[in-house]
Image: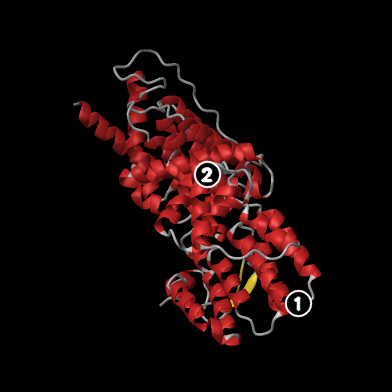
Amino acid sequence: MKNLIRIALISFVLFAIACTPKTVEKVTEVEKPVVEKPKESLISNPCIMLDDLSGAAKEEAETAYVLYRDYIKSKEYDTALELWEKAYYPAPAANGRIKYQFDDGIKIYKYKYEQTNDMALKKTYHDTIMSIYDKRNECYPDPGYVEGRKAFDKYYYYSAVAEADEAYELFKKALDLKGEKADYFVINPMTGMIAEKLINEEISIDEGRKYVNILQDAIKYGNANCGTKCQAWEVINSYAPARLENLEGIKGLYDCNYYQEKYLPMLEANPTDCEVIGKVYGRLLWGECDPSGAAIAQAKTAKQTHCYTPPPPPGPLRQAFDAYEQGKYNESVKLFEDFVNLTDDVEKKAKYTLLIAKIYYGDLKKFTKARKYALDAAKYRSNWGEPYLLIGKLYASSGPLCGPGTGFDSQIVTWPAIDKFEYAKNIDPSVAAEANKLITRYKQYMPTKEDIFFRQLKAGNTFTVPCWIQEKTTIRTVD
């Protein structure tokens, strides 16, 4: 008998909804009913559940819970909202176990946010979404999860109405609460924000170091325990590690342990490679490792054994090399520049200006300055391809700087990169072999025909690559 009554009630509700005209969009929120929790339920939850309601109220809320999801599936969001409110507000915890009602409410209000250009209305919808997140945290506490979700939404969807730095502060709280177990969706946006703030000197090195360390720990933990989210961690791995590595040029951000863990294995794998030995030795000094410690001693011995070259005679050039070998990259750049300004030898001007560009690229991770000095170097020697190879490498490695590491925004950096490789071999046959190798490597990362069609672009047309590159190129596809 009870089931017959319920079926009749649902049929009546469906009939009533079908005959009800669409509601006019609301400008102000309707005051929601406040229900006192009357009794303890068998399932413990701090919020009102269906079992806490009286007979008629429970039946109405249960029916609304059954019905509203079908309207979401058919994208009838106005009707879905009316029913969702009848389900959610009387019993936000539902049966004390399910949580999808919160995500459903957020989905409905996100749709309404996207459908209006009224900024006041957008702000109302944003605030409602944030309150739904807060209620979820009250009903089903999960320290750090809701903070991360709110930050993610503010960062990607609601920046137009969110207060400045709200997302950043919420991301910080999420990392503080979850540490290495931070949710995967926090990693990439927080990595981008922390990098930008450090580069622009908007936060202290100490603050940056704290959250960079948490992010690195979270990446290690997440990859080791990815479970059903391994595909998401693959996306993270294409962006966050490279973006964090680019921060090595900020003095004092990473400590000696970081450089030892990262660079000593390179030395052990390539014990006689002078390029590797010099890089490892310089990085350990840059990281302020103990000059008398075992790590420095290992690198120094390898350098003296396999890579000894007579030092330049005393003077600015000798001082520049000494500073570089001691990991004093900023000082070495200044000293090399002093030498370039003093010498009348055009070949030396070209050589050491390009060396400055390489230090900015490989050691200080300042790509704009690296390009500047590479172009300056090219002015000293005609038909010299090496500076353009370096600029191409700068562009090709900018995927994580200019996009999420994968997808169109990161792939388009290959266009100007390949332009530079092509130009280098055209003006300088001596670099053709390396240029061709680089062209082959990076062609495979160009966008597909589907990628450009989706964006209403056409192969062969001119396109300006944004980000720090800001260069015109030709649209090409991998297929």
- Residue 328 got which mark? none
Q: Residue at x 64, y 61 (%)?
A: 360
Q: Nearer the viewer, mark 1 or mark 2?
A: 1
The kind of secondary structure element at disc 1 is loop
382 or 200: nearer the viewer: 382
Farthest residue, direction top: 39
Q: Is residue 145 left or right of residue 365?
A: left
Position of residue 231 relative to residue 343, above or below, is above
- Residue 345 got which mark? 1
User: Counting other residues with Cα less than 10 Å from the Cα at mark 1, is it few (<14), some (14-19), or many (20 or more)?
Assistant: few
List x then y, in percent, for residue 381. 69, 81
236 or 169: nearer the viewer: 236
206 or 257: nearer the viewer: 257
Q: Is residue 143 visible?
A: yes
Q: Distance from label 1 to label 2 (Cα)?
A: 57 Å
Q: Amino acid at mark 2?
A: Asp
187 or 243: nearer the viewer: 243
Quadrant placement of the N terminus: top left
Q: Is residue 228 left or right of residue 384?
A: left
- Residue 153 got which mark? 2
Position of residue 458 relative to residue 83, above or below, is below
Q: Residue at x 50, y 55 (%)?
A: 242
Quadrant placement of the C terminus: bottom left
Of label 1 and label 2, which has the lower sequence position? 2
Q: Residue at x 32, y 37 (%)?
A: 66
Q: Residue at x 49, y 46 (%)?
A: 295
Q: Amino acid at mark 1?
A: Asp
List x then y, in percent, for residue 141. 43, 26
User: Counting other residues with Cα less than 10 Å from the Cα at mark 2, is it few (<14), some (14-19), or many (20 or more)?
Assistant: some
